[in-house]
Image: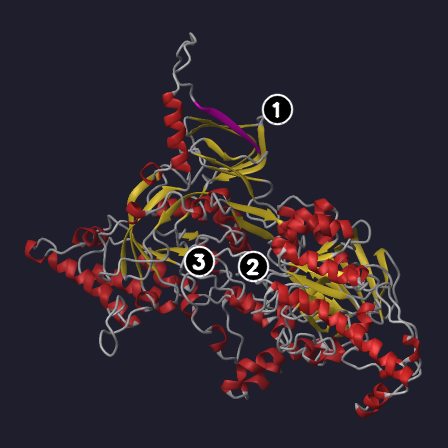
């Protein structure tokens, strides 16, 4: 059906529409059921206890109600049987800057923005995530900011952000790494000023209220804000950082909407995803978080060179999200020798909780990253946790995703074999009890594998702009955040230039 | 740095009077070592479980099955032959080329390689013990490639397995990519031909026909003629970069054209043949070998060529000799072993994947008498793995090069 529709489209529009069509195809072919499904698999890796041979997963209304061997399920349930396959929890992408219109804002302090307004449901990124078994993604603004917008946790299924939503307002991005073109000193100053400004503003509002000059109310009315039961009341400042006394005098709806998200950070209501690109940035991030009382809500998003700050991070017991570049390469400034450090192993040894990020989509997704960790001596359990349970914990979703247990979201990936083997494929994906991906009907996957053209489509998809010679060419795999690292770039800013060119 | 330090040390040692202890001078002991593994993948058609590879004087002297390692012995999960990368892309002078002419078959890359480049060690520590270094591909016919070891001696000469193993060149957009015509702007290095893909093809054909005409005619002799004739006569493989279908076809048709001119023995190796899967019949018909570029998740590569994941598997199945390459994987980038893993994911069997990074490339350039498999009498080049090779969950943790443990997995 999809192909017929496609055939009538203008050739020029094909490329743009394919993404949308493929997504609808997935959903059209397998229409949303009511979130009720029973999955039987040769092996069920729950990540919540031992794997179960010939296990059954019962999902009702989108939630898992039972996992085990020989368990009962409703007689009329839709049963999917995969006797030769492995059922696995959907992967959790703890941080991504993809799937958005653009990853970074020009405004330094943009806490009032929300990536919800920027997420593109038909982005190829989401389709490709699903293909790799990623069922939960924390979409955050990129690192080129001082304070970024509010993030959103989504599933890679749905035609609107509302449909995709797993958890709105998952946290705000901040960066200790300088915005492009700025220096570290400017960045640090900007971070400090952001909260100084907030404090001054709050003190000013309180003072005005005391003086009987009710500018805040007038401004709130002017902006068209309305009070509800919750915000019509004032309450004392929360959190465990600095305090502005008498803030209870100010009904919360009167607080400037550009400042309110920052107050949410200081009061410890909002998680902070703090980008750091050098070990020094870690120090800055920790200081900022400590000074403003949100250290216990902070997650550090690290470039690979930041492994050197692992002790400091452990000392403050902060969880981290590692860069997609797992091996940090450093060139000795004197001898020119290259030293490679496998970053996840460092954090594992120090006992810091960490999550991994994909290094691209279909090719080097989370399974790939976890497999590399095993190759570098981590246990399978440790490696898998970093892409499932720990990632869920760090993003505040441990009660919903990351493992197959009763009460959790019905997100199941069916692998053809060991999830970490290069020989295994994602065959099926179930998200919240709905069967949303089937590899046997995935025309794009077939194209990547065999070069076969999907019927009635243009072959133009494959011939992009010719790449330059002998340069790393996986431009499509990039994470478009400037403050963070990309796969190709040596991600730290320590001045390693490639010796070639 | 290093040679200087060594020279200094040598000078210092020389200046110190030798101790006059009455030590009996013995004959240099034979450097012997053995490595144990749960599985030895010999690359010569068999996998031996629980075996010991015995090495003496840089050569493999025995492969003993059923050996029991002691606690002190070097014991790993798996051993494969040291890998061979024909398209290592380690260049002298960075990414440059002799720009005086676009056809320079007489230029030898081995005379200008830097033995201290970090690129060698990057290959070596990932289990690649032999590579072919070629001139950069901004010339149509760039010059003569060399097969050499990635470590050991500080001299390129001593590391060389075989000089002049192939005549390297390129078809496609790269040789013309920086050139421009000499008119309309100030003359510079790049005011030269060819300026188009058509021009590249023409340059190749002209070189070949010039050689045919000059054969046996001293009046017409020119620089590079001996190398071109060697190539036409099949004594020197022609190693051509051709990513996209049309470029692979150009190379293959050129070979057939030369066969029509009485030169049927030309050996062709396509490098970076991302789109070779589209032209399998031609490749089989002409007996052409293919070296594949590194895996790309998106399939998109240079010159718009689409690199299907099952390319290696398809070629192998059709009987086309196939090798994999890492293009000098950046530090932290994907290694040759990982390329083999990706090829397996694309459907290549384990044995063929092993061959594609060991004996196949060695055969293509005629160095298989020394490297490419674990057999008695061959060079003791071994990659030591911490798990099943060609899985992402395992990697090369140790390397033996010419009988020397250059990378110790116990450290």
Give left or right: position of B178 versus A156. left
Give left or right: position of A236 versus B16. right
Q: Which residue is mark 2?
A: A493
* Precedes in sequence: disc 3 or disc 1: 1
Q: Report the chain holding disc 2.
A: A
Magenta segment: B31-37
Residue B81 among those drawn in magenta: no
Q: Secondary structure at mark 1?
A: loop
Q: Is residue A419 visible?
A: yes
Q: Count residues near mark 3 (Cα–Cα under 10 Å), then give few for <14, some for 14-19, many for 20+.
A: many
- Extreme-top residue of the structure: B22
Q: Count residues near mark 2 (Cα–Cα under 10 Å), then give few for <14, some for 14-19, many for 20+.
A: some
Q: Which residue is mark 3?
A: B293
Q: Is residue B353 above or below residue B34?
A: below
What residue is shown at x 22% (from left), y 65% (from top)?
A: B205
- Quadrant in which the C terminus of chain B is drawn: top right
Q: CA distance from mark 3 to mark 1?
A: 41 Å
What residue is shown at x 39% (from left), y 31% (from top)?
A: B8
Q: Which residue is mark 1?
A: B70
Q: Is residue A39 visible?
A: no
Q: Are marks 1 and 2 on the same chain?
A: no
The percent position of residue B257, horizontal first and vertical second, equals: 23, 63
- Quadrant in which the N terminus of chain B is drawn: top left
The nearer-to-camera label among 2 and 3 is: 2
Give left or right: position of A14 versus B8. right
The percent position of residue B270, horizontal first and vertical second, equals: 35, 58
Q: Count residues near mark 1 (Cα–Cα under 10 Å), then give few for <14, some for 14-19, many for 20+.
A: few
Quarter of image, res B105: bottom left
Asked whether B41 or A174 is in front, the reply is A174
Quarter of image, res A8: bottom right
Q: CA distance from mark 2 to mark 3?
A: 30 Å
Q: Report the chain holding disc 3.
A: B
């Amino acid at each position: 059906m999809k192909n017929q529709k496609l055939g009538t489209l203008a050739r020029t529009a094909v490329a743009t529409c394919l993404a949308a069509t493929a997504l609808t195809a997935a959903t059209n072919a397998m229409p949303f059921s009511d979130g009720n499904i029973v999955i039987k698999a040769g092996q069920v890796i729950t990540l919540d206890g031992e794997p179960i041979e010939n296990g059954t997963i019962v999902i009702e209304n989108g939630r898992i109600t039972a996992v085990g061997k020989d368990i009962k399920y409703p007689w009329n349930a839709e049963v999917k049987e995969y006797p030769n396959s492995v059922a696995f929890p959907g992967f959790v992408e703890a941080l991504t800057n993809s799937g958005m219109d653009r990853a970074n804002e020009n405004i330094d302090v943009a806490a009032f923005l929300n990536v919800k307004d920027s997420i593109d449901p038909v982005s190829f990124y989401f389709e490709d995530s699903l293909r790799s078994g990623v069922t939960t993604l924390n979409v955050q603004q990129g690192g080129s900011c001082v304070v970024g917008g509010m993030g959103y946790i989504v599933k890679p299924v749905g035609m609107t952000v509302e449909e995709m939503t797993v958890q709105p307002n998952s946290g705000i991005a901040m960066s200790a790494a300088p915005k492009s073109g700025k220096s570290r000193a400017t960045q640090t100053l900007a971070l400090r000023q952001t909260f100084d400004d907030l404090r001054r503003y709050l003190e000013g509002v309180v003072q005005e209220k005391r003086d009987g000059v009710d500018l805040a109310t007038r401004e709130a009315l002017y902006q068209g804000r309305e009070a509800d039961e919750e915000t019509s009341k004032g309450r004392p400042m929360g959190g465990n950082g600095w305090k502005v006394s008498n803030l209870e005098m100010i009904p919360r709806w009167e607080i400037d909407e550009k400042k309110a998200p920052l107050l949410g950070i200081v009061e410890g209501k909002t998680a902070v995803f703090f980008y750091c690109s050098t070990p020094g940035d870690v120090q800055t991030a920790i200081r900022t978080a400590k000074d403003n009382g949100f250290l216990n809500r902070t997650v550090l998003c690290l470039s690979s060179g930041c492994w050197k700050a692992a002790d400091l991070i452990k000392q403050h017991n902060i969880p981290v999200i590692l860069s997609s570049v797992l091996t940090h390469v450093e060139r000795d400034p004197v001898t020119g020798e290259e030293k490679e450090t496998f970053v996840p192993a460092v954090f594992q040894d120090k006992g810091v909780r960490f999550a991994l990020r994909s290094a691209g989509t279909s090719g080097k997704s989370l399974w790939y990253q976890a497999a590399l960790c095993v190759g570098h001596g981590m246990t399978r359990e440790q490696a898998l946790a970093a892409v499932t349970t720990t990632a869920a914990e760090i993003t505040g979703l441990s009660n919903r995703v990351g493992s197959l247990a009763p009460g959790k979201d019905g997100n199941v990936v069916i692998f053809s074999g060991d999830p970490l083997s290069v020989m295994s494929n994602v065959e099926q994906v179930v998200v919240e009890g709905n069967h949303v991906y089937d590899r046997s009907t995935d025309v794009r996957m077939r194209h990547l594998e065999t070069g076969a053209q999907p019927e009635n489509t243009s072959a133009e998809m494959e011939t992009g702009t010719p790449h330059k010679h002998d340069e790393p060419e996986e431009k499509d795999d990039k994470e478009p955040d400037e403050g963070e690292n990309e796969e190709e770039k040596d991600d730290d800013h320590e001045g390693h230039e490639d010796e070639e060119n | 740095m290093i040679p200087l330090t060594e020279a200094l040390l040598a000078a210092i040692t020389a200046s110190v009077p030798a101790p006059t202890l009455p030590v009996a001078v013995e004959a240099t002991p034979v450097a012997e070592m053995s490595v144990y593994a749960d599985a030895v993948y010999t690359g010569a058609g068999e996998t031996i479980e629980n075996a010991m590879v015995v090495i003496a004087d840089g050569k493999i002297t025995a492969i003993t099955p059923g050996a029991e390692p002691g606690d002190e012995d070097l014991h790993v999960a798996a051993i494969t032959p040291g890998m061979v990368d024909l398209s290592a892309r380690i260049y002298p002078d960075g990414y440059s080329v002799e720009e005086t002419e676009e056809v320079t078959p007489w230029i030898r890359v081995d005379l200008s390689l830097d033995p201290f480049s970090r690129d060698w060690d990057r290959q070596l520590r990932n289990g690649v013990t032999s590579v072919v270094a070629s001139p950069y591909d901004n010339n149509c016919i760039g010059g003569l490639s060399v097969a050499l070891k990635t470590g050991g001696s500080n001299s390129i000469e001593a590391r060389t397995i075989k000089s002049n193993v192939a005549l390297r060149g390129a078809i496609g957009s790269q040789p013309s990519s920086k050139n421009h015509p000499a008119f309309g702007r100030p003359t510079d290095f790049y005011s030269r031909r060819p300026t188009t893909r058509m021009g590249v093809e023409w340059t190749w054909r002209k070189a070949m026909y010039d050689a045919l005409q000059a054969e046996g005619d001293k009046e017409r002799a020119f620089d590079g003629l001996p190398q071109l004739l060697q190539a036409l006569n099949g004594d020197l493989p022609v190693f051509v970069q051709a990513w996209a279908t049309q470029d692979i076809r150009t190379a293959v048709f050129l070979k057939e054209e030369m066969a029509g001119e009485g030169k049927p023995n030309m050996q062709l190796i396509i490098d970076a043949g991302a789109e070779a899967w589209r032209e399998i019949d031609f490749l089989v018909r002409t007996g052409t070998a293919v070296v594949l570029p590194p895996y790309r998740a998106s399939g998109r590569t240079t010159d718009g060529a689409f690199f299907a994941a099952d390319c290696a598997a398809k070629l192998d199945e059709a009987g086309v000799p196939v090798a994999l390459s890492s293009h000098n994987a950046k530090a932290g980038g994907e290694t040759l072993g990982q390329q083999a893993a990706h090829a397996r994911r694309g459907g290549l069997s384990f044995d063929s994947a092993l061959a594609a990074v060991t004996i196949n490339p060695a055969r293509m350039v005629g160095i298989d008498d020394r490297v490419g498999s674990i057999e008695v009498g061959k060079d003791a080049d071994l990659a030591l793995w911490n798990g099943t090779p060609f899985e992402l969950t395992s990697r090369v943790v140790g390397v033996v090069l010419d009988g020397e443990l250059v990378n110790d997995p116990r450290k």
